[in-house]
Image: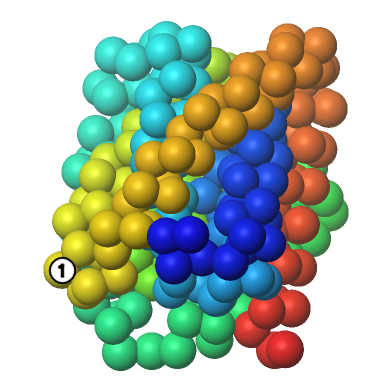
């Protein structure tokens, strides 16, 4: 069916539902979580186009619930503008490297950050460094996104280190996700990775992903700030392990 075996379609939709739940509970992690699961079954390059539609829609749903759009855009516009530029650079690299190796490298980075965050739970970036690091963070995040499909590094540790209010944090990081995803659509099409069949399956996954998001949002309302932070780190740790295992298998 559409070039996929029945078990592959089941794996795709289960991964999308779970990633949607993670997204709703933590405000992030759809693409990274979904890719970590799908790459184990299909390969990273084959999985990238599948997460496009549900990732984009889940981002918008979370953004609408988080509000604070103007606050986030005004404060972080240099980072947000550079992220799409980085995606283009990363996509050029993706066309020339092995997808599994790129995913494994990202897995190592994710696990290293989780270890640091647990060791230094209250680390804060000095205020004087916020603005200079914003464009660097956006460009680097975009490059990693284009190369691996994951959208969380280093924008996640950067934003977490600023001590933002939860909803401002969620709005800002999802703005970054959304802009990068739009560029990924064009880039994957140019690379020949976004086939008609993949686009159809991706679109079909929107419903299950949103159902997962709604379930996760109900859980998020009950989480304390500390529990929320731990949930975010656990999402990253799971994604890192998945990408690393796939890369070295």
Is 121 located above or below residue 163 in the figure? Answer: below
Whole-percent x and y of residue 59? Answer: 43, 30
- Which quarter of the image is occupied by the C terminus? bottom right
Is 32 located above or below residue 162 in the figure? Answer: below
Q: Is residue 23 visible?
A: no
Q: Residue at x 36, y 48 (%)?
A: 200
Whole-percent x and y of residue 86? Answer: 26, 62
Which residue is nearer to you in this view: 146 or 73? 146
Q: 83 left or right of 99?
A: left
Which residue is nearer to you in this view: 151 or 207? 207
Residue 8, by quadrant, is bottom right
Secondary structure under tag 1 reads helix
Q: Residue at x 66, y 52 (%)?
A: 10
Q: 108 left or right of 66?
A: right
Q: Residue at x 81, y 11 (%)?
A: 222
Is 107 located above or below residue 67 in the figure? Answer: below
Q: Is residue 91 visible?
A: yes
Which residue is nearer to you in this view: 160 or 57? 57
Q: 222 left or right of 150?
A: right
Residue extending furthest toward the front: 1
Residue of label 1: 190
Whole-percent x and y of residue 77? Answer: 24, 34
Which residue is nearer to you in this view: 140 or 241? 241
Instruction: Say how many tags the image has.
Output: 1
Q: How is the image coloured?
A: rainbow
Whole-percent x and y of residue 118? Answer: 82, 50
Q: Residue at x 68, y 79 (%)?
A: 246
Local packing at callout 1 (Cα closer than 10 Å; few below 14, some 14-19, many 20+) is few
């Amino acid at each position: 069916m559409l070039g996929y075996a029945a078990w592959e379609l089941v794996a795709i939709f289960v991964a999308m539902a779970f990633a949607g739940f993670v997204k709703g509970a933590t405000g992030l992690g759809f693409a990274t979580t979904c890719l970590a699961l799908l790459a184990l079954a299909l390969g990273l390059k084959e999985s990238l186009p599948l997460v496009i539609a549900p990732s984009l829609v889940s981002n918008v749903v979370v953004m609408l619930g988080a509000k604070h759009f103007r606050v986030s855009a005004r404060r972080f516009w240099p980072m947000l503008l550079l992220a799409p530029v980085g995606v283009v650079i990363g996509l050029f690299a993706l066309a020339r490297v092995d997808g599994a190796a790129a995913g494994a490298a990202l897995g190592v980075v994710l696990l290293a950050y989780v270890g640091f965050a647990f060791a230094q739970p209250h680390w804060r970036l000095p205020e004087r460094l916020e603005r200079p690091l914003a464009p660097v963070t956006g460009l680097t995040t975009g490059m990693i996104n284009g190369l691996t499909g994951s959208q969380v590094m280093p924008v996640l540790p950067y934003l977490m280190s600023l001590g933002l209010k939860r909803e401002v944090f969620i709005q800002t990081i999802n703005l970054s996700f959304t802009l990068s995803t739009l560029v990924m659509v064009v880039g994957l099409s140019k690379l020949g990775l976004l086939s008609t069949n993949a686009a159809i399956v991706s679109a079909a996954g929107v419903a299950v992903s949103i159902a997962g998001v709604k379930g996760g949002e109900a859980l998020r309302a009950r989480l304390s700030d500390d529990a929320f932070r731990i949930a975010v780190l656990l999402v990253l740790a799971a994604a890192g392990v998945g990408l690393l295992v796939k890369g070295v298998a």
